[in-house]
Image (spheres, grey):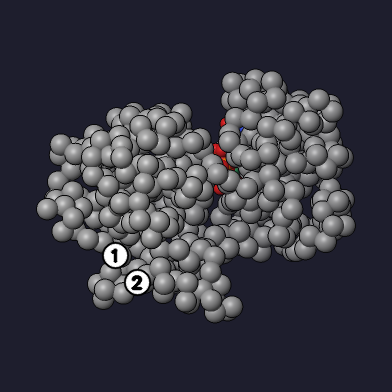
Amino acid sequence: MRLTVIGTGYVGTVHAACMADLGHDVLGIDVDADRIATLSAGRPPVHEAGLSDLLARNISAGRLRFTTSLAAGARFADVHFVCVGTPQRPDGKEADLRYVDAVVDGLVPHLRPGALIVGKSTVPVGTAARLGRRVAAAAPGCEVAWNPEFLREGSAVHDTLHPERLVVGTFSRRADAVLRELYGPMLRAGVPYFGTDPATAELVKVAANSFLATKISFINAMSEVCEAAGADAALLARAIGADSRIGPLFLEPGLGFGGSCFPKDIRAFAARAEELGAGDSVVFLHEVDRINTRQRRRTVELARRLLGGSFAGHRVGVLGAAFKPGSDDVRDSPALEVAAAVRAGGASVRVHDPEALDNARAVLPEVTYTLDVPKACEDADLVLHLTPWPHYARLDPAALAYVVRRPLLLDARGALDAEAWRAGGWTVNTLDRYETEAAS
Ligand code: NAD
């Protein structure tokens, strides 16, 4: 089938390449001409495992092209996936829908008869209905559907080619049939398909993100209680996660969530529920958000205590800048927020990250960046582990102890092997278990 993918960011680039890989004829569209030039040259604009090969293979097979022209896209295909950003509004907690609206308004005058616009962006419930009315009025016979995206940055290609489920909200059987045909190879491979109405599809996405964010904040709240009680949050997490009704995933006490989805999605969901008169039902999301934000302050304050009460004059090595491992995305990155606060407190800060340094430099130019872990840690009085890249779990703690001024570690992700680091000569601290007397 012929289709367009509009918005070639983290979601759109991966979706376009994966749809081409399924055998479809795909045109990727973006307003960013530099990005389109990069993609046309076969270079991915974002870091995702496997994306480079996928792009190269499908471009050279002639199934994947890119353009900045929405009108050309409208003429090219009958199915248009909308993958543009829906960030938090600058003046509130609601989602900013201006990019989604601009795409729909830009497509409508040029649509082929019967075209289908399929939203993948995360939107407030009711958006598909609103846009559907606009499309039906301006281009009778054309319609809107919603097919939210569940990929995880860091494993986006795998998640798109092998999703745990497809959720598709349509206003007609015809639209549902089009999407079943488009995803045919996945359905034949046994991927569950939840066909529903658009409002339910929109809500599945924000409900899933709210649940995951709540799970993370729950264990972080428990970690705060463990800290006060002198109990072990990591063991508590493993022990409650062993209950099959709870499960171990997303139950790792630490610095909390960030990125371009969870924080803005739970805020937008709470704001939308309020508009619908159901604000009380999701009031807990405000607390989930507060607990999460607190972990960043908690990390900064513990780092300060470990350094004897002040950052001034100290050197701090930081492991990680991306908001999560496997990605170069630093949007609302907890690691960068902590690094910025430590720098603002007067420390000299050197940050290592294997993939996110260019993006990090653009957001936080006040610190030094390096692709070399020993350089990041050289002469450090404290090392902060802030993004749990697998690379850091494979470091040689004894060798790294030689380059620092003081082998003092704050593992704010609780992901390193504390025993191995202690054996390598380090004092190891986590958010709930620390030895501040080490500073004296
Ligand atoms: P992104 O910021 O990486 O990419 C958005 C792209 O859209 C940019 O390249 C931008 O130039 C382009 N764009 C903006 N306006 C445009 C227009 N009028 N026409 C064409 N292109 C335009 O965003 P993202 O992270 O890929 O997220 C996209 C959507 O998917 C959001 O709603 C997000 O919440 C949702 N989502 C993201 C993820 C994720 O992990 N990043 C996962 C699931 C869902």
Give SS at disc 2.
Answer: loop
**Label annotation for residue 433:** 1
Q: Nearer the viewer, residue 192 or 99?
A: 192
Pointer 2 or 1: first along the chain: 2
Q: Nearer the viewer, residue 371 or 152?
A: 371
Query: Can residue 277 be spotted in the picture?
Result: no
Ligand 1 is in which quadrant of the figure? top right
Q: Nearer the viewer, residue 375 or 289?
A: 375
The x and y percentages for residue 278 are: 49, 69
Give SS at disc 1.
Answer: loop
The x and y percentages for residue 312 are: 15, 39
Sort mark 2 into few (<14), some (14-19) or many (20+) by Cα contacts within 10 Å: some
Q: Is residue 235 left or right of residue 85?
A: left
Query: Can residue 58 be spotted in the picture?
Result: yes
Q: Amino acid at mark 2?
A: Asp
So how many labels did they put on this image?
2
Q: In the displayed structure, would residue 72 be above or below residue 431?
A: above
Q: Is mark 1 within 8 Å of ligand 1?
A: no
The x and y percentages for residue 253 are: 40, 63
Say which quarter of the image contains residue 141: top right
Residue positioned 25% across, 35% down in the render: 379
The N terminus sits in image quarter: top right
Sort mark 1 into few (<14), some (14-19) or many (20+) by Cα contacts within 10 Å: some
Q: Amino acid at mark 1?
A: Arg
Q: In the displayed structure, would residue 248 be above or below residue 157?
A: below
